[in-house]
Structure formats: structure tokens, C-alpha cells
Image: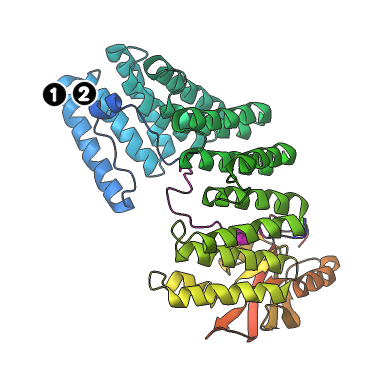
Amino acid sequence: MLGIDRSTFTRLMYPARRLGLILLAVFAVSSYALAQSDGPTVGASRTSLAEDIAASRETLRALIREQGGDSLAVARERSRLGSLLYLNNEAMAATREFRTALPALQRELGLFHPELVEPLGYLGLSQQALGLHDQAADSLTRAQHITHRTLGTLNENQIPLVYSKADSMQAQGEMWEAEQLQYMVYRLHEHNFGPAADETLGALNRLGTWLTRAGRTGPALTLYRLALRDMLDDEGNDTPEMAPLLEGMARTFLFTYGVRGRSLNLLQRVVNLTENFPDDFGPGDRFMANLQLGDTLLLFSLERDALKRYTKAWRIAQESPVLGDWERRQLTDRKLVSGPFQELTEDGANTRTWFRFTFDLRPDGRPGNVKLVGTNALAGVVTQTIARFRAARFRPLIIDGEPQPRAEQEILLAYRNVRRAAGS
């Protein structure tokens, strides 16, 4: 697969309305359930979470003293505490609270009360964090079934539950079941939001990415082709809504086949869209589109064409007051773009087979004057590793719009996804 570093294939920062991917940090629950419980605040800092956990435990102790351990109020507070513990990465403690709270909630409210969706969902997430994927799938299924009874079988509130259940099925090696759940959640988006809605397009891209990573390249490409065909305008031209799907299709070609022409053509179409539709894409979108295309050109050692894209990205960043240090650092910080390596910290080398190189970088990102100055690898892999590092590419340093060399560099590397070699 050409030694492509997937972390360098940067996602475009589209406006929220353009790319509606769901981030599954917490569960969407029915408005009734939200009205019945004072749930944890999403996105709270670790300090405030710790404070909320301490306050919840104090409230729980007071309720037990006043009402006894089996009251509905106690069960609700236990459920709230469990949610806070999960958000604080305390999955074991969260699971204990939910297992204690749920029988009382079911006894007092009934087995299918909508208020049970949230604790069952968080219980499923906590079980996932503990690697108990069969139990997690069961908890998530129970929560999903309640949404079916209260909101209908095609309700949108079950979407994050289905996504998470698919994760547990995949973790158990049940790939066919996981794939069906991924398709189900896309259809749920289509039903609830419409086929052209941002949320649906985001779900389609997520499905395509999942299929690609699962090795189901044919279905992924078919999915993208059909969707993109339907999104062309009446004259057969690209439309702004196509941008995230063009990117996703390029990723499928690139990661699976290392196909140069098709992946680059698709990313060029994304760049064209960001330039031709300024009302739909801001400077950040144009910057990232050019940066992404530049990185991909480097993957195929097309340094001259890549430099044009990096220089264009630099100009966009300089001319756009809304862009800041993060964008400018993309073209000043050293970044390894292609090759089978990942950069290590000194601490990160403890469990890895590592290689320390000194080198210079040419203005186009090619290493020169390469020297291996240290390694814990076996002798048989050293020569091929030096050759592979010489073939690696770095994002060029751009100063005042011109690519510059970097002299006397040092880097600590390991092969991606390879731990310490036996006997090293």
C-alpha cells in the first residue's frame, strides 16, 4: 500500500452544515427523558467533572438517608452519577452504579419507560470501555428497543445507539452484523433528514469510510458513485454538497489501492469547489483543500506539483485574517507526510523498535545526507530501513511564500503498527 501514512490525509474543515458527521460522545435521548433527569453536562472539564461527581455522591448519600436505598430518587441520582463517572473515564465504577440503579428504575417506571434509554446507553458505553462487548451490545439493544416502543422503529434518537452497537459487533468479529448496522444508521438518517441533508451526507461518508477500513472497497466505491451521480447539477457539474463525498471516495481509492490518478483527480475537484463557490466555503476550507492535495501529491513523489499547492495554502493563510497560528504552523512545523514510519518521543521508544536519523531536508521535502545514528533493531532490517527513510517525504517549510531547506535535522522513528522486534 505504498507505505502511506493515513494520519497525513487531513480531513477538510467544512462548515457544520456541510458535513454532518455525528460524534458519539453521549447519547441523544427523548425529550421526555431529558425532562425527567438532570443529566451530566457534556464537554465539562475534568476538574468540573470531579466536582460534579463529588456533589452527586453527597446528594446520593443524603437521599439514601432520607428515603432509603430503593427509592426512585436514589435510582435517578445513581444513574446520573454513573453517567458522570463514564465521562470521567471511570467505566468500572460507572457500570456498578448503573447495575444498581437500573433494577429500581425498571421497577418504579416500567421496563419500557423512555427515561431508561440514557442509563442503558451509558451502561453500554461503559461496558464497551471495559471490553465487555457482548454485554454492551445487549444494553444498547435494550435502549434501542425502548425508543422503538415510544418513538417508532425509524426514530432518529436511536442513531448513536446503533453506531455504538455496530462498534461492539465489530469488536467481537461479527463483521456482517456490524455492516448491516452501519447501513441501517445511514437509512435512518435518510428517512429522518432526507437524502440530501447534511446529516445524511455525513452518515453516507461515515459508512463509506467504515466499508473502506473493513476491506469492503467495492461496496464503498459503489456507494460514493451513486450518491455523487445524484448530486450533480442539471448540466452535470459538481455541486458544493459533493465535497466531503469526493474526499471520502479519494480516501477509498488511496488507502485501498494506492491509485494515483483517481485519488488526485477527486481531491482536485474538491479544491475547485472551494474556489468556485466562495459563499459555501471559507478560507479555512480552501486552505485545507490545498494542504490535503499537497500531502497526497507528495505520497506519489510529485514534489513540484505539491509545492504549488503548499504555496497556495500559504497565501490563503497570509491573506485571511480569520486563519491563525494553527494554519501557519502546518507550513512551518516539520511534518512527516509519506513513508511507513511514525515519529516517536523518547518515552515512546521504550516498547518499540526504533531508528534515530540525522538528515537535511531539501526545499521540496526530500531527505538528504541521511545517517542512521542509533537503533535497537536487528541488523537485517537496518539497510532496508535507511532506504525507506530516504524515500520518505516531509511537508516543506514555507517562509514568505518560498520553500526553504531545513539543515541538521534529527528524528526518532518506528515502523507504524510494529512493536519491539523479537530479540531486539
Estimate the spatial distance between the alpha carbons at disc 1 and disc 2, rounded to whole Å.
10 Å
Colour mode of the rendering: rainbow
15 in the magenta segment:
yes
Image coordinates for residue 407, horizontal then vertical, percent: 64, 87
Between marks 1 and 2 in the image, the one whose residue lies nearer the viewer = 2
Residue 160 seen in the figure: yes
Which residue type does callout 1 highlight? Glu
Q: Which residues are magenta?
A: 4-23
Residue 132 seen in the figure: no
- On residue 73, which mark appears? 2
Image coordinates for residue 213, horizontal then vertical, percent: 67, 44
Q: Earlier in the sequence, mark 1 or mark 2?
A: 1
Depth order, front residue of 84/67: 84
- Residue at x 76% of width, y 63% of height: 424
Residue 8 placement: quadrant: bottom right
The image shows residue 317, relative to residue 46, as above or below, that is below
- On residue 66, which mark appears? 1
Residue 81 placement: quadrant: top left
- Residue at x 55% of width, y 35% of height: 131
Depth order, front residue of 360/291: 291
Which quadrant holds the N terminus? bottom right
- Give neighbour class at mark 1: few <14, some 14-19, many 20+ (Cα, 10 Å): few
Kindly state the secondary structure of the residue where label 1 is placed.
helix
